[in-house]
Image: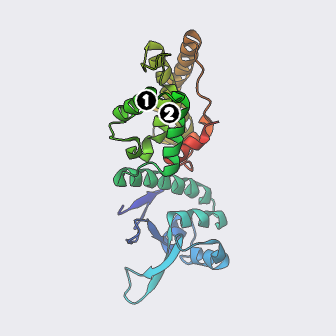
Amino acid sequence: MNSLTFNSMQFHPIQSNDDQIWITSSELARALGYAREDSVSRIYDRKSDEFTSDMTKIVPNPQTVNLTVRVFSLRGCHLITFFARTEVGKEFRKWVLDVLDKESLQQQIDTRVKISAEQQAELKEIVDRRAQGERRLHAEMWARHNKHFRIARYSDLLAIHFQDAVNYLETLEIKSKGNIYIDEKQSLEMLCVHARFFQAWWSTHSPALAKLNPLLVSMLNDNMFSMSSAISGVSKKCGFAMPNYDYDHMFELKTLPHERYRLLK
């Protein structure tokens, strides 16, 4: 990422070999509304024991030969805002979290991070529990799962798809004879679940989107209300209960995509 913009101020991140975004202390001070460019460095000097090496470091100054400059990673910038005493500090803190969330997701996409051993164990527990020792059913569930996500084996699942995999395996309908099928009722149930996920995302992020296009957000809010009524009606008619997820916190910026499965209640 070559540049970042906050409130019309453009940052010029320092290049590093660790794939992190590093911002100079002087640019960070200006973004936080300080008149003095050394204000952030002064904050750091008072609170240095609370920072780690992946939050701040000294690097050669790209603007001046033989001089160095202190830089802060996004996590370091986030910590600085808790000590800053400016009006824009709170707004900047939210902006940093937004950038962190986007960077985390993009890194997973770019590097195609696969699920961890812990996540593999979570999926295996679901299949073992639902198969109840039936080898044919066990194999069938994994086959359907792998075909659905277009992978050779479940350990190849990308981390960004983990929550979808949990929901898929938990809602896969099983006949008593061991055959697996998805009927009309289950299709409606899966549709309602995904609609509820989207509503949770909308509830978290619509305030920020409203700043860009308040009229569009107002129109979509009406659609969200209609969607809630539709989900409730379909659920009652078909006789199924929505999964008890922690929807209110699932899509907060501090909640990374691969950690959302922990919000299962």
Q: What mark, if any, has residue 127 been given in the picture?
A: 2
Nearer the observer, 242 or 28: 242
Q: What mark, if any, has residue 168 been given in the picture?
A: none
For mark 1, does the 10 Å Cα neighbourhood hold few (<14), some (14 to 19), or many (20 or more) residues? many
Residue at 41% in and 31% down? 139
Q: Is residue 80 above or below residue 178?
A: below
Residue 262 image offset from top left, x and y in percent: 59, 43
Question: What amino acid type is highlighted by mark number 2?
Answer: Val
Residue at 38% in and 29% down? 144
Residue at 59% in and 75% down? 39
Q: Is residue 61 above or below residue 211?
A: below
**First reached walking from the N terminus: tag 2 or tag 1:** 2
Residue at 50% in and 20% down? 189
Contact? badges 2 and 1 (CB < 8 Å): yes
Q: Is residue 197 left or right of residue 43?
A: left
Residue 192 image offset from top left, x and y in percent: 50, 22
* Residue highlighted by disc 1: 141
Residue 21 image offset from top left, x and y in percent: 43, 65
Question: What amino acid type is highlighted by mark number 1?
Answer: Met
For mark 2, does the 10 Å Cα neighbourhood hold few (<14), some (14 to 19), or many (20 or more) residues? many
User: Where's the C terminus, which quadrant?
Assistant: top right
Name the secondary structure under disc 1: helix
Q: Is residue 214 above or below residue 116?
A: above
User: Where's the N terminus, which quadrant?
Assistant: bottom left
Residue 75 visible in image: yes
